[in-house]
Image (cartoon, grey):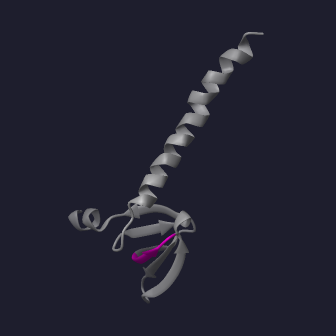
Amino acid sequence: MLLPLLLIPVLYFVMIRPQQKRQKQWQQMLGSIKPGDRVTTAGGIRGTILSIKDDVLIIRVAPDNLKMEIVKNAIASVTTQESSSAS
């Protein structure tokens, strides 16, 4: 009878809390993007941000300098201009 009551806090710390932490970090990453940053979308497309309008980004994709319009929520990762030039 006591076992289900003990499992609830364990499940929270093992499953729910880490997911909430990742979601918060992802939201902060999206809030800090700026033109010039290199991004990778959830679909694997890599490009450089040219402009940001509300929830839409215009990115330039190599090698043909193709411009694409991407929804901000589709961004999986960001590499800032400073960190790529410092490496």
**The C terminus appears in which quarter of the rendering?**
bottom left
Magenta stretch holds residue 25: no
**25 is higher (above) or lower (below) than 67:** above
**The N terminus appears in which quarter of the rendering?**
top right
| Residue 54 percent coordinates (x, y) | 49, 71
Q: Among all residues in the image, which is located at the extreme right?
A: 1
- Locate residue 29: give its quadrant: bottom left
Q: Which residues are drawn in magenta?
A: 49-54
- Locate residue 14: give its quadrant: top right
Q: Main secondary structure of the magenta part?
A: strand
Q: Among all residues in the image, which is located at the extreme bottom?
A: 64
Which residue shows up at 55% across the image and 35% down it?
17
**66 is higher (above) or lower (below) than 9:** below
Q: Among all residues in the image, which is located at the extreme front?
A: 54
Front residue (pair 86, 71): 71
Front residue (pair 66, 20): 20
| Residue 66 percent coordinates (x, y) | 47, 87
| Residue 51 percent coordinates (x, y) | 41, 78
Q: Among all residues in the image, which is located at the extreme left?
A: 86
